[in-house]
Amino acid sequence: MHKRRVLEICLDEIEAGATGARGKGRAAHVLAARLIWPRPAIAEKVSLKTVDLQGGKADLNAAIWGRRILFKETVQGPCGLSIEVTRRVSDTQAARFIHFLYASVFTALSAEVAATAPGGGWVGLLRQPLRFLARETGTPPKAWPAVMAAGMLDVRPESIGKRGERVQIEIPLRAPKDVFETHRRQRGGETAMRRERVRKAGEANGRAVISIAAYD
């Protein structure tokens, strides 16, 4: 029988190679982290954040703990950790997202889910958090930014190390589908648009660096 351990999982760095947004300035994105089967009867936990990427990157090593923390969760045996980063969101979308997250279902987003529970309700939320948030924040599903970079890691709690010892792990991210950028150019007083594929589905598209510490 696997021993139960409390794992603290923090986000240290995030880099998205191509998100469909041009330029090197600041861009807000939504990051969804999923802890998959952390222990028996608990199918999934979800953590949702907005992250500001500068030139496609963010270094959170010096950020306060509250900005970095993804999970502080009891786990038993192997589990999975998934990281997903969306296309750029507008400041308005980001503000509505944050308001919704903290004023509406903040506690429910990290609710435990029984593996035998029927579909719908919070089970549907946890399986498709970004689609749920699109609906709840009043954003049409087609207008909500798609996931541009995603990766998964197998977490084996027994290999984390001694109590309080922090282990840093890099998770490669890949494009779940083709990523396109739209180029605009003025020609004779008119705007010409050209759509360019910058990543093929399955190609490398960034990385996430997390740190894990065990407390038991």
Image (cartoon, rainbow, N blue to C red):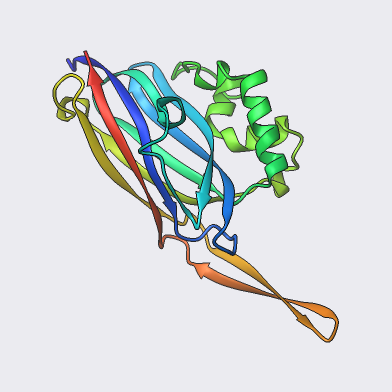
Q: Quadrant of the N terminus?
A: top left
Q: Is residue 163 left or right of residue 199?
A: left
Residue 18, position as x, y percentages in the image: 50, 61
Q: Is residue 193 visible?
A: yes
Q: Is residue 104 visible?
A: no
- Which is nearer the eye, 177 or 67? 67
Q: At 31% across and 40% down in the image, what residue appears?
A: 153
User: Of all residues shown, which one is farthest toward the bottom?
Assistant: 188
- Which is nearer the eye, 168 or 7? 168
Q: Is residue 111 left or right of residue 143?
A: left
The quarter holding residue 134 reads top right
The quarter holding residue 23 reads bottom right
Q: Is residue 80 left or right of residue 68?
A: left
Residue 154, position as x, y percentages in the image: 28, 37
Q: At 68% across and 35% down in the image, what residue appears?
A: 95
Q: Quadrant of the C terminus?
A: top left
Q: At 26% across and 41% down in the image, what residue appears?
A: 169
User: Of all residues shown, which one is farthest toward the right?
Assistant: 189
Relative to 77, is 199 above or below?
A: below
